[in-house]
Amino acid sequence: MKKYDQIDHTGDVGIRVFGRSLEELYENSCYAYYDIICNLQKISPKEKKIIEITIEEDEDNPYALLLRELLQELLLLTQIDFFLACRYQCLSLSRKSLKMELWGEPIDEEKHEITLEIKAVTYHDLKVFQNQDGLWEGWVIFDI
């Protein structure tokens, strides 16, 4: 099973991510984010970071909002903490919270090149659902 597809979107870039479980969907979403912004093979798992996300439980599609918030956290880690990750594990998941473990390293300009600058993770076409094959699928559009 492939982890994700890149979606062409006018002026933006999107991803369609897959997983056999919701946990795997979130792990593959992390993979997709880093795969489109840099060369994953150049990232070493030197440091661990924990991301914890909590949302309001009354959301119509809480798993989609958790996906958007996760990717927004990855964007902040890249832009503010200058951190890139290459290993991802979902530690816990509920309808209102997500806890992820990331392994990676600080950005080293001699080693890492950011090949795509993402400005924001949008709400446009944001969705998470179980498809007809029984796989979980998530759609996200990035503003570039």
Image (cartoon, rainbow, N blue to C red):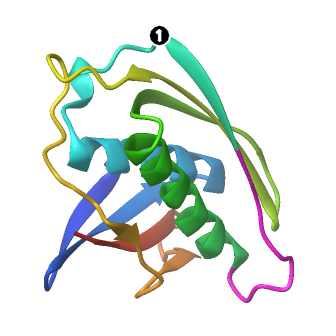
Secondary structure category for the residue under label 1: loop
Q: Relative to the observer, which residue lies in front, 76 or 51? A: 76
Q: How many marks?
A: 1
Which quadrant would residue 110 be assigned to in this image? Answer: top left
Which quadrant would residue 94 be assigned to in this image? Answer: bottom right
Mainly helix, strand or loop, the magenta region? loop
Q: Position of residue 77 (x, y in %)?
A: 48, 42
Who's the residue at 22% across and 19% down the image? 42
Q: Residues within 10 Å of mark 1 (few under 14, many from 20)?
A: few
Q: Position of residue 141 (x, y in %)?
A: 34, 75
Assign the C terminus to one quadrant of the image: bottom left
129 vs 10, left or right, is: right
Who's the residue at 14% across and 81% down the image? 11
Is residue 100 shown to the viewer in this render?
yes
Residue 56 magenta-drawn? yes
Who's the residue at 55% across and 74% down the image? 128
Q: Position of residue 126 (x, y in %)?
A: 47, 81
Most extreme residue toward the right is 57
User: What is the span of residues highlighted in magenta in the rendered image?
Assistant: 52-61
89 vs 34, left or right, is: right
5 vs 23, left or right, is: left
Residue 104 magenta-drawn? no
Is residue 1 shown to the viewer in this render?
no
Which quadrant would residue 78 be assigned to in this image? Answer: top left
